């Protein structure tokens, strides 16, 4: 392990954020995955680093390169990408060795298995406010670092051996603690010099309302909000100023371009002629937006939006 843990801890430039952005809070999170038997075309190892919920670089074993993505591909001086690639290649080697160790423990060296890891930190109001470092094997918790003890906590029988290796010398535990509490937050602050304006942007949602008739004659109204950032949003249907029960919330989903989308639906009988409103709350609006479905439109126009703040 003397050759394993030092490399593990010498990757302070590979990090990433979690995803739940709050005002004044920023996250740096690094997510990685190793596969014992990757399918054709899939890399054996891949890593993605995030700033808040935005991926800013990616690495995989096929290319052997760490490369900035999205708006960060246009940023100069944020990182030494050749050095980052070297570190990621070292990470790949150690990561896959750990995966093999686990498979050896379970005497299953030919099966298809997955090893995943995540580490990163958070700062709030420019001060360290949280950190995480944990691993999973085949989708189940494997081992995590508790920086308060400090120690690696095994969560799987095979992880006891991993803990012994990673704690063979006490200095490695102290370095892990220092990384989470000091190095990672300082790195995040440095990245924010290049990224704060992008992460702090506010994109209001575009809202459309559509309807469709279902078997039985009832109509489904769908309120779709898309292209918004940050991801927190609330939308629901109102009738006569009362919130309606609607199909289970769909959640918030990535839109493929760094923004998000979400929707809500409600089923209405033909006899119900009262107006229905979709109420949307998002930081991009100074106040709630209420959008009405206009029953006077003809069926051929039903895919058009009727957006009227009330």
Image (cartoon, helix red, strand yellow):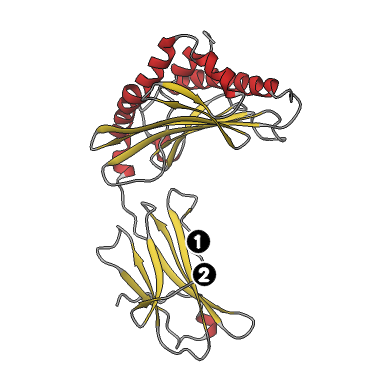
Q: Residue at x 45, y 24 (%)?
A: 81
On the image, numbered disc 1 is attached to which residue?
250
In-front residue for pair 270/244: 244
From the viewer's perspective, is residue 250 above or below residue 69? below
Q: Quadrant of the N terminus?
A: top right
Q: Quadrant of residue 165?
A: top right
Q: Position of residue 112 (x, y in %)?
A: 72, 32
Viewed as shown, does residue 97 lie left or right of 210?
right
Q: Position of residue 294 (x, y in %)?
A: 42, 83
Binning the other alpha carbons within 10 Å of mark 2 as few (below 14), some (14 to 19) or many (20 upward) gives: few
Circle on res. 55? none
* Secondary structure under the numbered disc 1 in the rendered image: loop
Binning the other alpha carbons within 10 Å of mark 1 as few (below 14), some (14 to 19) or many (20 upward) gives: few
Q: Position of residue 128 (x, y in %)?
A: 28, 31
* Secondary structure under the numbered disc 2 in the rendered image: loop
Q: Quadrant of the C terminus?
A: bottom left
Q: Residue at x 53, y 20 (%)?
A: 91
From the viewer's perspective, is residue 139 above or below residue 146? below
In-front residue for pair 217/191: 217
Q: CA distance from mark 2 to mark 1?
A: 8 Å
Q: Residue at x 58, y 18 (%)?
A: 161
Viewed as shown, does residue 169 lie left or right of 281?
right
In-front residue for pair 306/292: 292
From the viewer's perspective, is residue 274 above or below residue 22? below
Viewed as shown, does residue 31 lie left or right of 22?
right
Q: Quadrant of residue 242?
A: bottom left
On the image, numbered disc 2 is attached to which residue?
247
Whether tag 2 and tag 1 are in contact, CB under 8 A, the answer is: yes
Q: Residue at x 47, y 65 (%)?
A: 263
Q: Position of residue 143 (x, y in %)?
A: 52, 27
């Amino acid at each position: 392990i003397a050759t394993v843990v030092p490399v593990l801890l010498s990757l302070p430039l590979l990090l990433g954020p979690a995803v739940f952005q709050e005002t004044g809070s920023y996250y740096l999170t690094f997510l990685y995955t190793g596969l014992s038997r990757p399918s054709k075309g899939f890399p054996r190892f891949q890593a993605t680093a995030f700033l808040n919920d935005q991926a800013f670089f990616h690495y995989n074993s096929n290319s052997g390169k760490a490369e900035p993505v999205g708006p960060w591909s246009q940023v100069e001086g944020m990182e030494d990408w050749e050095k980052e690639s070297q570190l990621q290649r070292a990470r790949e080697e150690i990561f896959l060795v750990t995966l093999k160790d686990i498979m050896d423990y379970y005497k299953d060296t030919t099966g298809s298995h997955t090893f995943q890891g995540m580490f990163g930190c958070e700062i709030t109001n420019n001060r360290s406010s949280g950190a995480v470092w944990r691993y999973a094997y085949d989708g189940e918790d494997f081992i995590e670092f508790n920086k308060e003890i400090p120690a690696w906590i095994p969560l799987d029988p095979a992880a006891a051996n991993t803990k012994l290796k990673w704690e063979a010398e006490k200095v490695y535990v102290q370095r892990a603690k220092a990384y989470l509490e000091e190095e990672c937050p300082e790195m995040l602050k440095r990245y924010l010099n290049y990224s704060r304006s992008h992460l702090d942007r506010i994109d209001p949602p575009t809202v459309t309302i559509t309807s469709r008739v279902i078997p039985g004659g009832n109509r489904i109204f769908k309120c779709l909000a898309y292209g918004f950032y940050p991801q927190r949003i609330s939308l629901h249907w109102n009738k006569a100023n009362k919130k309606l029960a609607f199909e289970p919330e769909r959640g918030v989903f990535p839109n493929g371009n760094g923004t998000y989308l979400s929707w809500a639906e409600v089923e209405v009988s033909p006899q119900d002629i009262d107006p229905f409103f979709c109420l949307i709350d998002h930081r991009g609006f100074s106040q709630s937006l209420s959008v009405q479905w206009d029953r006077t439109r003809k069926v051929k126009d039903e895919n058009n939006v009727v957006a009227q703040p009330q």
